[in-house]
Amino acid sequence: MTSTANTTDDAADLHEAGRLLFAGSADFYAAAQTLDRLPPMEGIEIAFAGRSNVGKSSLINALTGRNTLARVSHTPGRTQQLNFFKVGDRMSLVDMPGYGYAAVEKAKVEAWTSLIHSYLKGRANLARVFVLIDARHGLKSIDTDVLDGLDKAAVSYQVVLTKGDALKKGQVESRLAGIQAALAKRPAAYPELILTSSRDDLGVADLRAAVARLLAERGA
């Protein structure tokens, strides 16, 4: 039986590993709008997906401690390609186009969707997709469609709630419980949820620790 002290120590070690992991360099190095523009597969890749305006770029900036690494826009749908950021020499973060923004041309959305599906199915070094969900609204049908696709493609994913600072204390447990129940029968879903807010760094250390644990599991 694992003692509470050992569990606490393990968590502290992971948080420190996560802090060190993101304490070094972090730089944009590639962008791809088509499959032939994807960079060579080197090291571990971790992708971030979510609805437009869910706060992907803001969370990537908070995660890396760099305010302008990923471009933050107040206009949903501005990320129109896969953007690759090298973090140290062990991994890359991939900012994927936001989904669900109806004002973008249908043909362009179809092109993004095709690119994303091809990337997810064919990227052997993709370790996990963090699917960002707005904590204020929970899972929407468009989110579950994406989760269905990840399950079908057998791509490991973990749900990260953004904008957690907007929830009242009494709302947090019920929101987490509802999403946890929805994920319980999904084969590719990692069971642990992470509640975050890039505004006040809520959960950012937990997300860094999750990435550090993933790399350790992959031997990276």
Image: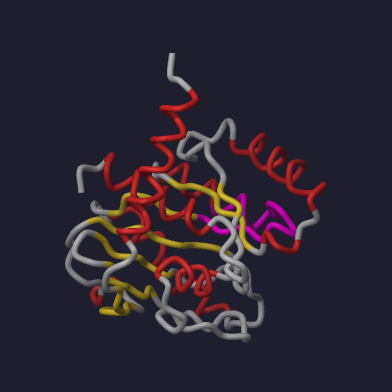
Instruction: List x then y, in percent, for residue 43.
Output: 19, 58
In the image, residue 51 lies in the stretch drawn in magenta:
no
Observer-nearest of 217 and 82: 217
Answer with left or right where residue 211 lies relative to residue 171: left
In the image, residue 142 lies in the stretch drawn in magenta:
yes
Q: Colour scheme used in the picture?
A: secondary structure
Residue 154 is drawn in which quadrant?
top left
Answer with left or right where residue 61 lies relative to residue 25: right
Residue furthest to the front: 5
Residue 90 is drawn in which quadrant?
bottom left
Observer-nearest of 52 and 154: 52
Residue at horizontal 40%, vertical 59%? Answer: 117
Residue at horizontal 28%, vertical 48%? Answer: 215
- Vertical side of 182 occupied by 36: above or below: below
Residue 55 is drawn in which quadrant?
bottom right
Instruction: List x then y, in percent, for residue 100.
Output: 62, 68
Which image quarter is the N terminus in?
A: top left
Instruction: List x then y, in percent, for residue 77.
Output: 57, 80
Residue at horizontal 61%, vertical 80%? Answer: 76
Observer-nearest of 7 and 35: 7
Instruction: List x then y, in percent, for residue 149.
Output: 49, 49
- Vertical side of 184 occupied by 79: above or below: below
Q: Which residues are magenta?
A: 131-146
Residue at horizontal 50%, vertical 74%? Answer: 57
